[in-house]
Image (spheres, rainbow, N blue to C red):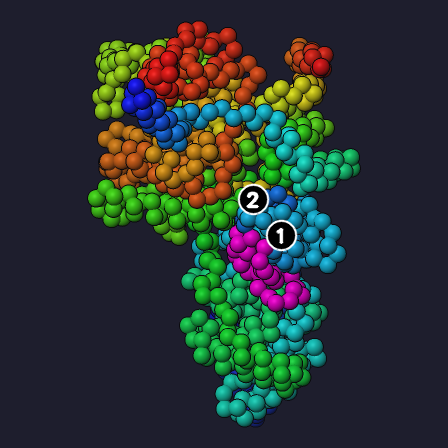
Amino acid sequence: MGEHTLREVLKRRSEDTLRKIQARRGTWQHKGGKQRKFGWGRALLWLILLGLLALGGYAIYLNQIITTRFEGSRWALPARVFARPMELYPGKEIAASTLVRELERLGYRRADRLEEPGTYRYTGGSVTFITRAFQFWDGPQPALAVRADFRGSQLVDLAQLRSGDDLYLVRLDPALIGSLFPQSGEDRILVRLDDTPRLLRDLILQVEDRRFYEHLGLDPKGIARAFAANVQEGEIVQGGSTLTQQLVRSYFLSNAQTLWRKMTEAIMAVEIELHFDKDEIFEAYLNEVYLGQDGPRAIHGFGLASYFYFQKPVAELQLPQMALLVALVKGPSYYDPRRHPDRALERRNLVLDVAVERQLITQAQALRAKRQPLGVIAKPPVGTTYYPAYMDLVRQQLQRDYQPEDLTSEGLQIFTTLDPLLQERLEEQVSSGLQRLERGRGLPADTLEGAAVLTSVEGAEVLAMVGGRNARYAGFNRALSAVRPVGSLLKPVVYLTMFEQSDRYTWATPIEDTPLEVQMPNGKVWKVNNYNNEYHGTIPVYQALVHSYNVPTVRVGLDIGVQHVAQTLSALGFPRSVNPYPSLLLGAVSMTPLEVTQVYNSLAAGGFRTRISAIREVLTKDGTPVQRYPLEVAPVASPRAVYLVNRVLQLVVARGTARSAAAQVSGDLNLAGKTGTTDDFRDSWFAGFSGDHVAVVWVGRDDNKPVNLTGSSGALQIWARYMGAIPNQPFRPVKPADVEEVWIDPASGAQTQPGCETAVQLPFVTGSVPTQQIACRGGIRQLLQDVFN
Amino acid sequence: MSNKHFFRTAFISLLLMLLTACAGLSPEAAPYQNDAGQGAAAASDNPAVTGLLRDARAQRTAGDFDHAAASIERALRIAPRNVNTLQELAYVRLEQGMAEQAEALALKANSFAVGNYLELAENWEIIAKARTMRGNMMGADAASRAAAALRGDLP
């Protein structure tokens, strides 16, 4: 662009000069024929002089461009986003195969002998590997050779490979999950010259510019030699341009093959050589050279190309891989190893031949390398990201603290909480779960949509997120943006408020489950109905939560005050204001799946709210810490009241509206949760938790039409399969000192014996335990007792 | 007589079989399982957690509170209910002057330390310090008295 305008300016300038000269010549002509010859000579001299002056000015101008644009930070670097690093320690619940999968994801290479970082061996019950050095927020972590021994699905022993010394904790390098960069643009991972393998540098120099360290930006000898070599081979083997010229062309100029551009390139090449030393120019070249294309994203530099083609850092490249990257310099599109593997292979082998000829490698090495396949990973790591929904969340959180241009130009390193293993399972379960629901219910294919979020209980870190049935599609992110009524998901909030606001209630308090009409302030009458219009007479109030009865919930809510329920909801972490209308009690409040997750996370964490977060740390491109998002907790509900509610949420899963989960997930996990269904079956929700995970699933349609699914028949089915498919700790809430667990007869709410068939164990605040006692009702044991008596 | 005895035996056997079968249905849905103090006990013998806490203490001593907090949070990710780890973070927050966080963390530690008087007393002492820092003298006094009572309660 700049070059174009400049060229026009100069063209205009020389035309002006010419016109002036012609005008002057015209004057001279009037002075008579004698002086005509002398006048022409002078004019020519002037012309040359002016031409030189113009050229000098142009050179100064170009010099200006070089000093302003090439000094300091040379590239706009997109922020790089990383998954959580996997932590390994003795006692961790992890199978050897899971570790191997993580190492593969990180691009570690399976090898017979461990010699360098990024390699591993897997034999029987143990995995040995050499980690890559990595700069974390808390400092650099050197490469480490490790042996991990497994028994069953547990890591039992961790030791240094060479010394055999025990290790108590090993942190793997984190997987790169994407970049934040402007809509279309260049992408690169900067490499330092010193971190680039010697052999790769030598290959580049020998193939592209043998006399790089000798010439001054231009190399006439090199051009001649390249010309000769090309004639001899009958094809383009070597380019005539020096590395400096290639750098100038790529960094400053367009690709147009004009004489003017060639001249500009030459001037700038020399000028760059005057300003910077050879190593600096070489390093810039390594990072600038164009090596591939990924849709709108241009792959620049060996650092990114190494990931783009082999998913590993340059330091780990093998000889054939280096040769291929060097081969690509000539034409990344023509020699694209994914689209034209034959061409790429031929060119790679040619590079290997050059390497033998220049004595960089032996003939034997070359032969071995030539026998290797291209080894290019089939699908490049997706440019923006493989996890678009999760990246939306990362971007949203970063936008609170950073300017958009900082995120797309400063090369920040963002360390997130994403767990790729849990993420992949969630994607699978949402996608297959929606298909299963459609088939099972005779719904048209591809009509259901879904979203899901998984967080850690105590840290509230977002471990996985799915924004739609196609997790690869970066479109409407339902987990973040679909605002839907939550229905019965709100009932736990009502009962939490009940325990916080009043000591008149216990779980055994009798309550009327009969049709109810509420006189509204505006004079209208609100008819409260149960699901299926079934009513149960007088019941202990806990049953209203276990079986999601509407009428008792509304009675309780109106008694304790709707505004208090609204306050509890806000305290648990719902960020927007809530209208305290009575319909709130039945979930007439719209939330996103992420907002629901926040509310349930506060419940799971015992009444301590931690703001949901996807980011742990931010570092500059050189690894200098910029920011950390520390753990912050806020006590927002009484742990006792939360305990009382959570114990009954466990009953929801064990024998209430979510009992069908038992087919998918072990009862030993003591999961807790709640179904949510909205009017006309438009939304199907399930929110629940284990000891270490909170998961929320929403199923519905984008056009908000009925899906004819309840929370139980829809979202729960996905939730339960997912919870059954990932490692979970059992949910074991810690019983507060002033709470007692008592066996209760469900029908009467009276105390009964532990063994009674229908009895449930419920928590009571000391002093509020029902005094009424009742014998077992009609159970088998009762019958047995009768027989023996 | 013997016929009657046979039927009686057969009937009881059948009932016992039925009972056994029903036992598999587990009538005791989600029985309470005590987890009090388990976090603390389980974590204290986890070498990863003790190692990280050792690092954190060194960082704290060196006045590097941000790194100390980061090490402790790493330990919390491994054992989130560890009372001692929560206390460590609360101490770091106290030294950083973040009294509100210190108190919240101590309260959270309390919820996992049920029945463990020594730990509870320590938590209340942290709360007392945090409240003093925030100028809530009455609250601090109440917390101190709670701690003293717990220490006095020790067998």
Residue A125's x, y, as percent? Answer: 59, 55
Q: Secondary structure at mark 1?
A: strand
Q: Which chain's residue wears label 1?
A: A
Please state if A559 lies on the left or on the right of A707 as rendered.
Answer: right
Identify residue type, mark 2: Glu
Q: Is residue A108 magenta?
A: yes
What separation in Å lies between label 1 and label 2 (alpha carbons)? 12 Å
- Farthest residue to the right: give it: B62
**Residue at numbered disc 2:** A93
Taking the spot 26% from the left edge, 40% from the top edge, the residue there is A703
**Exactly how many numbered labels are in the figure?**
2
Along the line of sight, which residue is nearer the eye, A747 or B49? Answer: A747
Q: Which stretch did the figure color magenta? A: A96-125
**Residue at numbered disc 1:** A149
Identify residue type, mark 1: Asp
Q: Secondary structure at mark 2?
A: loop
Is residue B10 something one can see in this rendering? Answer: yes
Taking the spot 34% from the left edge, 48% from the top edge, the residue there is A432
Taking the spot 47% from the left edge, 62% from the top edge, the residue there is A380
Please state if B16 lies on the left or on the right of A517 as rendered.
Answer: right
Residue A513's x, y, as percent? Answer: 28, 14
Q: Is residue A262 magenta?
A: no
Classify A557 as above or below A366: above
Residue A2's x, y, as percent? Answer: 51, 65
Please state if A630 lies on the left or on the right of A408 as rendered.
Answer: right
Is residue A264 something one can see in this rendering? Answer: no
Residue A557's x, y, as percent? Answer: 36, 15
